[in-house]
Amino acid sequence: MKKISSKSQLAIVLSKLEGFSDPKVKAEQYVTDSEAAASALWNVNLLGDIEGKVIADLGCGTGILGIGAMLLGARKAFLIDSDEKALNTAKNNILKLESEDLVNKEGFELVSQDINEVSVKTDIVVQNPPFGTKIKHQDAVFLEKAIETAPVVYSFHKSESKGFLDRLSSKKNAKMTHEWHFRLPLKATFSFHRRQIHRIDVSCFRFEKS
């Protein structure tokens, strides 16, 4: 199996993954930027939270975070989403990388499940959930489920949500330990978008159960 040896190499591999074929507005299905995903995952790895770990990518979409974790040496990845079309794309992405000797498909488990029904237990969660702009507090639902799923959670959210997320995690006996900031490019995805690229302030927060 080929090894990923740098953050830039990881970003290049992730940039070649297939995105959503039929993105859903309500689910806020935007492709996670490969540079931001690679940067966040590289930091996760530097903290010792990937290699040999069992990972869950909640609301995985087409699988970029869970696949990225496996590229960096995770033992197993659960890719969980309620959208079967997105999961099918994730499967195709896995098969593509397996053909390039970068991952083994046996290390993945794809699960079609609503976030409220998730009951798997893992070492780590990495996720880029809906930000709650279409369904109010959906970001909170994902974070609460992530904290139930694993003792350590990495989760992308709007940077302005930091105070709210800090209070929410405290109520779940977890604390925010690290944060990394990105100007995340959201490419025009839906017909109502007027700009080709709209950048938003997003942070990847690390939470750990106390």
Image: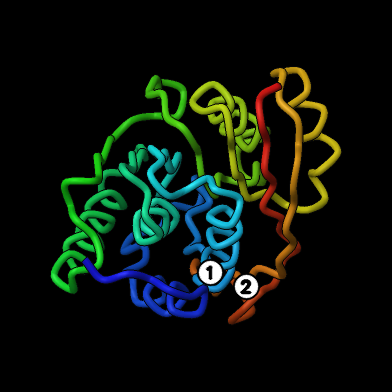
- Where the C terminus falls, by quadrant? top right
Q: CA distance from mark 2 to mark 1?
A: 7 Å
Is 83 situated above or below 203? above
- Where the N terminus falls, by quadrant? bottom left
Nearer the observer, 167 or 188: 167
- In this figure, which residue is indicated by the disc labeled 2? 185
Left or right, 71 with reference to 192: left
Is any part of residue 9 visible from this angle?
yes
Q: Earlier in the sequence, mark 2 or mark 1?
A: 1
Where in the figure is residue 137, as x and y percent of width and height? Answer: 67, 33
**Res 21 quadrant in image:** bottom left
Where in the figure is residue 108, as x and y percent of width and height? Answer: 25, 45
- In this figure, which residue is indicated by the disc labeled 1? 33
The residue positioned 54% from the left and 21% from the top of the image is: 148
Q: Amino acid at mark 2?
A: Pro
Where in the figure is residue 43, as x and y percent of width and height? Answer: 61, 59
The residue positioned 18% from the left and 52% from the top of the image is: 105
Nearer the observer, 106 or 17: 106
Q: Amino acid at mark 1?
A: Asp
The residue positioned 67% from the left and 52% from the top of the image is: 204
- Where disc 1 sits, the SS reads loop
Do the numbered discs 2 and 1 sit on residues whose CB atoms are within 8 Å?
yes
The residue positioned 54% from the left and 48% from the top of the image is: 48
